[in-house]
Amino acid sequence: MTTRREFIINSVMGAAAATLSSSLIAKGDQIRNFSPASGNNPLADTPNHELQMKGSYTDKGTIRFALEWPRQDLEHIWQALLATEELQDILGDDTLEICYSVNHEMLLAAVARGEPYDGVGDANTDCLMAAGVLQPIDDWVAQSQLIRADDYLPQVWQRQFYQGRQYSVPAFESCPFRYGFQYNARLVRAAGLDPDQPPQTYGEAFAWHQALTRFDSQGRLIQLGLDPHDAMGGILHIADGFYPAAAWGWDWYEPESRRLRLDCPEFIDQIETTGRFFSHVGPDRLKAFRAVPGQEGWGNAFNAGTQAMISEGYCNIGEFVHDSKEAPTDNRFSWMLVPDHRRGKRVQLIGGCDTVIFKGARHAQKVFRLAEFLNTPTACDIIYRLRGYLPARLSYLRQADRALYPGIGFYLDCLQQATEVHVTRPCPATRVLLVEWRRLRNLHHRGKLSAAAVARELQRIGDAALATTVGK
């Protein structure tokens, strides 16, 4: 696949970072009925650590840095980054090769061949940590003048560790605000709906979906209301969490005990609820719709103006501005959808992309310096200006130019109104579960498996994968 991340704390909360830390950690990975205390914004009182690069690099070679994003999304950004004196100083006589569309299986295949990539910027880091193929970076982080725990939300920082060692660094598209619901106000108005009254639940969204979905005279799908599994709605990843669990409000995995909870009433209800959208459209008609150029990948149909609603996050604000011909102000946003019985819940998830270095990497220290550079104001400004992606650094989020992207303020501020905050859960079986969830839910959409059977089989597959995971 060529997704851009298989990818925010929607906002930056109204309690000091230390207060946020104790509030979230006290109740574990998932927080319910969370009400941020009034007080200082954590973005307002964090240090502004500047990068101090020391030493020169004279070893020659090619640094191979992998990304799962496709080339067309990011190549212009990396060209701009490579034009900076800061990055050229790090590279010295070496060449940085950005390898696009590299998925998890390709990363592991390279390791098996004895030719690992030097690093990767958007991988299933939890799976790679558990597989024992990454290099610890504790010593380098301890010496860094930029990568500092007090410049990140505690839940972001904790994600960088496995069994007491640090293996990753937040970098590039690491902003922790991951979930939201977005819709095209132009299409909504054209369907006779009120764009100022967006749906809050899947039941309400299904009514909008029926009004917004259109077929031509041959029965072909030409405009889609909502695909509940597009973008964030269909992902399971350490960067982006598990959307169904956040929406339905259950703990799908407990890292300490390594126990999965997928064969449960909440997941079965989620499968049945979202299945209505696919029954209405028809899986074959949706497949044909996705085969149209410009409508085939993560969020592309929404940006093209042929899909009216999407389960997304902060990152789509910038993508919509740069990729869509639609008016930026027509990209409206609200809280992620929840089931009808949870109406009124304002849910957010803390996640983000991290950079890791492989064991045996020939240019390990330079990849770490690259991760540092991607957190500098120079790099963050380029990435934000050209794509709308933000880092996880609180000191940068505090001063990000909100005027560049209509709506970004919703994501930078919404934790002040959040009633429930979730945190991505590191699970060594994440990649296996994502692949199998996609396969099994397609069978359900085609009437070949019940929702209960999907949940039961995914539980079995996940349990088996965890039983064979390195680092049990």
Image: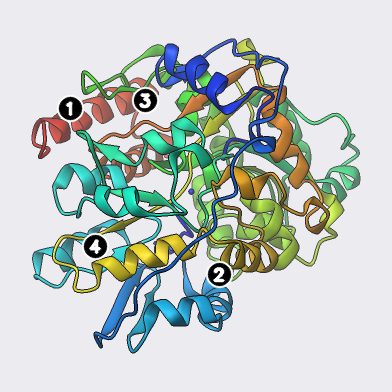
- Amino acid marked by disc 4: Leu
The answer for how far apart the CA atoms under marks 2 and 4 are is 20 Å
As measured in the structure, the alpha-carbon distance from the residue carrying label 4 to the one carrying label 3 is 34 Å
* Spatial CA span between label 1 and label 3: 20 Å
Front residue of this view, candidates 240 and 227: 240
- SS type, badge 4: helix
Quadrant into which the C terminus falls: top left
420 over 191 or under it: above or below: above
| Image location (x, y in percent) of residue 316 | 65, 52
Comes first in the chain, label 1 or label 3: 3
Q: Which residue is mark 2?
A: 73
Which one is in front in this view, the residue at disc 3 or the one at disc 2?
2
Q: Earlier in the sequence, mark 2 or mark 4?
A: 2
Residue beneath label 3, please?
450
Classed neighbour count for the residue bearing mark 1: other residues with Cα under 10 Å, few (<14), some (14–19), many (≥20): some
- Looking at the image, residue 318 lies above or below residue 233: below
Vertical position of residue 416 compared to residue 80: above or below: above
Callout count:
4
Labels 2 and 1 touching (C-beta < 8 A)? no
Residue 174 at what x, y percent from top left?
A: 50, 50
Kind of residue at disc 3: Ser
CB within 8 Å, label 3 to label 2: no
Image position of 96 (left or right of 462): right
Dot 2: what SS? helix
Residue with the mark numbered 4: 107
Q: Residues within 10 Å of mark 4 (few under 14, many from 20)?
A: many
Taking 91 as reference, is 325 left or right? right
Please report whichever mark, 4 or 3, sits nearer to the chain's N-terminal start.
Answer: 4
State the separation of the CA atoms marked 3 and 2: 37 Å
Please tell me whether mark 3 sits on a helix, a strand or a loop. Answer: loop
Alpha carbon separation for disc pair 1 and 4: 23 Å
Q: Amino acid at mark 2?
A: Asp
